[in-house]
Image (cartoon, rainbow, N blue to C red):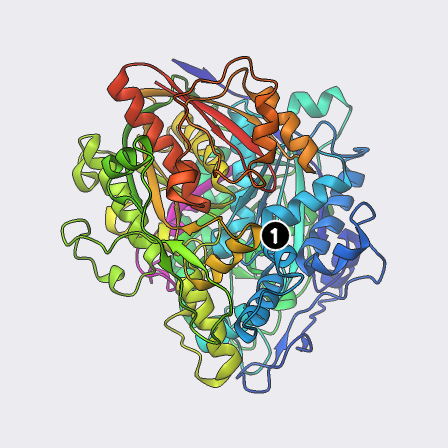
Amino acid sequence: MATESSKRIFITGAGIVSPLGLDWQANETSFRANRMNVTPVTMFDVSQRFAKTACQVDLPDERLFSKLPRRRDALIDRGTKMLLLAIREALAMAKMPGMQGVDAIIIGTSAGAMSIGQDYFRHARSSPSKLAGQLARIEYYQPHKQLNAIAIEYDWHGPMIVVSNACASGANAIGDAMAMIQTGKARRVLAGGYDAIAELVFSGFDTLRALAPSGIPRPFDAARDGLALGEGAAVMLLESEDAATERGASALCIASGYAIATDLHHLTQPDPEGKAALRTMAGACQMAGISPHEVHYINSHGTGTPYNDVAEASAIRNWAGQAAAHIAVSSTKSAMGHLLGGAGAVEAVICAMSLRGQWLPASLNVRETDPAVSFDLVREFREAPVKVALTNSFGFGGTNASLVLKHPDAASREITPVYHLGDLRVLGVGAVSPAGWGAEALEQAVTANMTLPLTECVRSYVSRDWSCQILQAPTVPQDRLPKFPRLRRASPITKYSLAAGLEALEQAGFPNAQGAGRLGIVQLMFNGCVQFSGKFYHEVIETPALASPLIFPETVYNAPASHVAAFLGVDGPATTLIGESSAIIEAISMAHTWLMQNLADHVLVVGAEECDWVAAEAVSYYHPDLKASEGAGALLLSLKGDGLMLSHSVAHAFHNESERAEKLSKLLKKMPRIGGESGINLVDASEIHAKEAWEESPQSALHPRSVLGEGMGAGGAWQLVLAAHLAKKEGAPVEVLLPATLCAAYSAVIG
């Protein structure tokens, strides 16, 4: 079955915070004045760095979070404060009294609340004892916990999705919001991105020699010497045309096109010809129903680094041909720096400003234009008619994204998409867990309620004065992973993800993805590549001038998905979400959307985690008997084939323990076959309380978490893999409850 959607998507409100100003008006004034804001870094020591400047936001002194206890004020990251300001402006511009009526929030970030994580690490590495305040740092380091603080501020309980595809994250979030509206999953979505400057990230780019030692970013200049790091946030309120019309809202602009592709060339360097960028620009324009010559302005990715600028210039030339000479292009990173996860969203809002004001922002600091430039490079602010704008965002890991925005009065020729409907099916599953390498080992361990061996977790630095044990994944068998160059340097989470994914593909009859057609990847994780992150930040602290440039790229959240995509040859959609174990359902929902949009024939959904002493100690702060674990679970999904049907429901964004227990009890009428209890009453309090409202509690209920430990990003995937195994063997549907510690809970049925 298929359904058509011909309605436009209105952007009715937008908010922007950047080094050029804290709102729309301040930023527009800065662009009109060709203003740049690069200042010495004062937030941390840069005396041993090559670069010593950045583009920083001057935040207001006022207390922004009125509903948060004052004792938690210091735990709100700078980036989250910027995001709240941008949300306020977007809602005010859209004439929305609050978030009531918003169906979902999708936010992109590269580093999240990295500064809080840095504080946790510094305290942990220097003290042998447990410290007061560490549990709070653990919680607020998580981006979804930071977003929950915003949800509390607005008394909002809808779904919150965190996308982390490095520098493309903000654009991906807006594109994902468009997809939700196009496929009828939402009518009104708040989407955007943010990032704040953090020592780990600044040091990482400095070790790569990507930061301009001159301090001046010069995108598309023949003698450019690197980027300037920036910070900021931006959000847009996207509404279906019907939803906007119902409340009498007018459009700032129309969200008309979006495309995502994966560059398999290198983890950090783009393909020299910009092939993935060409595909996203062409795909976004195809969705928008336009040809290159109809694009009036491109806000380029334009970082000011030698490789990126040449690759993008090549992509624009090959995409637009002779029309390139008439397309105005500029890089606003020349004025405000590279905002990482916030860049795509901020630059989308700048395009909206350009469309509304009929002007073009400049690409500053260009002395001699690079020979690769074939377009109209805007070097000073310019008044000009703009009906169609395109923005490019490219990130580490090869994620490429393009968005097309149109003026409300522009001729509407959007392609009427055909969306495929049907039951979501699980064609294959795979797993790596403390029980072993394979889904069968996982099932045997949980169904037999095995006691798995614990390992004393050894610190890398100061020895601790308390015991901390973990459940480790066994050493990888020789036949479980292929010989692949990227795996030699990759983190354990990459190896777990690939092994689980390969098992799922093989189970479905697609060994090494052969015969799977167009494959997409959605990865979920909680902490990500903690081993490399801890090692790199330790080097930053101890020997800042010698921190390894080889380690830093592996610390980004989307590195594992990038490596898996490279091995499987996935050059289409691949994305990484950050969340708790239960957020695997959000990953599945995104996979379903891609399948509906016909972006892929099959989608591999992977929930994964790796563990080291930092993560293990963090888990022990919740309860000394709660053991951290590691591994991955994978599901291969499709709308066709003879696999098991998968359906799910959700209870979102509880703000305290009483709300959590109440929502769990409403989610199901009886105890599910597979639950999420850890076996520790204090940790399981909400689930135990919810049982009182359940009509039936079958004795056959299984709790993988009590056997496999706290798998964080892998935990929910393990539950679903187990459900699929049991449903296939028993020939009956299996119900799963996926509770979360901080933010939301979900249920699913496989069978």
For the point 41% across and 17% down, which residue is it? Answer: 421
Q: Amino acid at mark 1?
A: Glu
In this picture, is 267 found above or below 544?
A: above
* Residue 716 image offset from top left, x and y in percent: 43, 37
Considering every residue shown, the one lying at the far left of the view is 479
For the point 33% across and 57% down, which residue is it? Answer: 492
Looking at the figure, which quarter contains the N terminus?
top left
In this picture, is 258 found above or below 601?
A: below
For the point 39% across and 33% down, which residue is it? Answer: 719
Q: How many marks?
A: 1
Q: Is residue 312 left or right of residue 41?
A: left
In this picture, is 87 found above or below 242?
A: below
On the image, numbered disc 1 is attached to which residue? 139
* Residue 56 drawn in magenta: no
- Nearest the viewer among 473 and 745 is 473
Q: Which region shows up in magenta?
A: 257-281
* Residue 272 drawn in magenta: yes
- Nearest the viewer among 367 and 585 is 585
For the point 41% across and 24% down, which residue is it? Answer: 701
- Tag 1 secondary structure: helix
* Residue 67 image offset from top left, x and y in percent: 81, 45
- Nearest the viewer among 622 and 211 is 622
Q: Determine if residue 411 is in view.
A: no
* Residue 655 image offset from top left, x and y in percent: 69, 38
Q: Is residue 427 left or right of residue 652?
A: left
How packed mark 1 is, by other alpha carbons closer than 10 Å (few <14, some 14-19, many 20 or more), is: some
* Residue 258 image offset from top left, x and y in percent: 49, 39
- Nearest the viewer among 286 and 732 is 732
Q: Quadrant of residue 377?
A: bottom right
